[in-house]
Amino acid sequence: MTKKLLVLLLFFLFGLAAAQEAVQDTTGPPVPAPPTNVRVVDKPNDGGHGLIVKWDLSKDDVNGLQNVVSYDVLRSSSSDGEFVSRGTIPKGLGQFEDMDATVPSADNPNPNFMPVNSTWYYKVVAISDQHVNSKATEVVPGTTKANLIHMQKIPILIASFLLTGLLWVFIASARKGKKLYVRPLAGIDAVDDAIGRATEMGKPILYILGLGTAGDIATIAGFTILSRVARRTAEYQTKVIVPVQDPVVLAIAQETVRTAYLEAGRPDQYNPDNIFFLTSMQFPYVAAVNGIMLRERPATNFYMGTFYAESLI
């Protein structure tokens, strides 16, 4: 009788230990509920290289176990192929934008490139705070499509049409002879005043084009102003002196002044000796210009071009 009791006691102890192990196995980290209602839609207003994945939050995200910390979006090129992670979204969010427009090349194979009209398959899993993944959702396909019109840029298109229409209205008004108001530039008025002052004083005008080459923007702008100044001096019969430091600039300056005198109807008053070459060296050029100022005593000096340290002298 005692032996039977011992045997029964041993069986009872072994059963109790097995039950405890089973209970321990079933009390592991809880698995979060998966998200639901996964949808894949084309990304609007793009060139056809993006998709938007949407889903309803897991029951354990805000409510339930509240152990969801993020969602992992998986993608594959086929429904039964290998799925790779495309990104992780924090809890509380139910949307992921998948986009890759970088075309593969020899240096960058880029397997994630999404061509236009390509179909991709997605599924989403919820991840708990103990790094336990939920069951994956159903696989949902999506196809990229290129959009012909960027809807968010329609206001820019409308503004362009309005500006173009206004431009044509002003052009038509000008052709009909309507006088349009153009705001005068103070700098141009100052140029005319300076030329008039030199004419009243009977003194010449000194025009300096700086040390730039003929291809410099500042020098080209200087030629433009020189043309206007030369036309005025031709009308007022005022001498204009243009010393230069570059042979190419010299040729262009002479032609600019000669053309201005022709347009003013005073070609006989053009004197090419007033536009002359000094030296291509920086400070000797400055010294020569200073000498001209001391000898000629010009009433007006124009500085239109590129200047460096010589401007301090």
Image (cartoon, grey):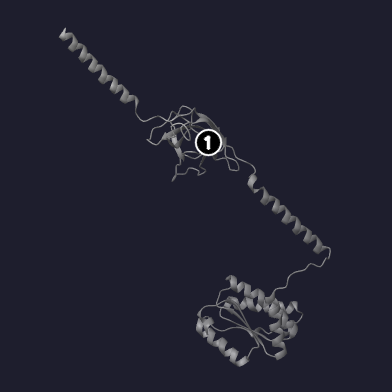
Q: Image height check: is 48 above or below 176?
A: above
| Residue at 78% in and 61% down | 171
Q: How far from the left and from the top, in percent, is residue 19? A: 29, 20
Q: In the image, 20: left or right of 153? A: left
Looking at numbered disc 1 in the image, what kind of residue is underneath it? Answer: Val
Q: How far from the left and from the top, in percent, is residue 87? A: 46, 39
| Residue at 72% in and 87% down | 199
Is residue 291 at least partly visible in the picture? yes
Q: How crowded is mark 1: few (under 14 residues within 10 Å), some or many (20 or more)?
A: many
Between 13 and 126, the one lying in front of the other is 13
Between 116 and 259, the one lying in front of the other is 116
Query: Furthest-bottom residue in view?
Result: 295
Q: How far from the left and from the top, in percent, is residue 227? A: 68, 76
Quarter of image, res 14: top left
Query: Furthest-top residue in view?
Result: 1
Between 3 and 201, the one lying in front of the other is 3
Between 271 and 313, the one lying in front of the other is 313
Q: Image height check: is 72 above or below 5?
A: below
Q: In the image, 21: left or right of 147? A: left
Q: In which quarter of the image is the N terminus?
A: top left
Q: How many marks?
A: 1
Q: How far from the left and from the top, in percent, is residue 67? A: 42, 35
Is residue 281 at least partly visible in the picture? no
Query: Furthest-left residue in view?
Result: 2
Provide the residue designation for mark 1: 53
Q: Image height check: is 183 above or below 19?
A: below
| Residue at 52% in and 78% down | 308
What is the secondary structure assignment of the residue under circle 1? Answer: strand
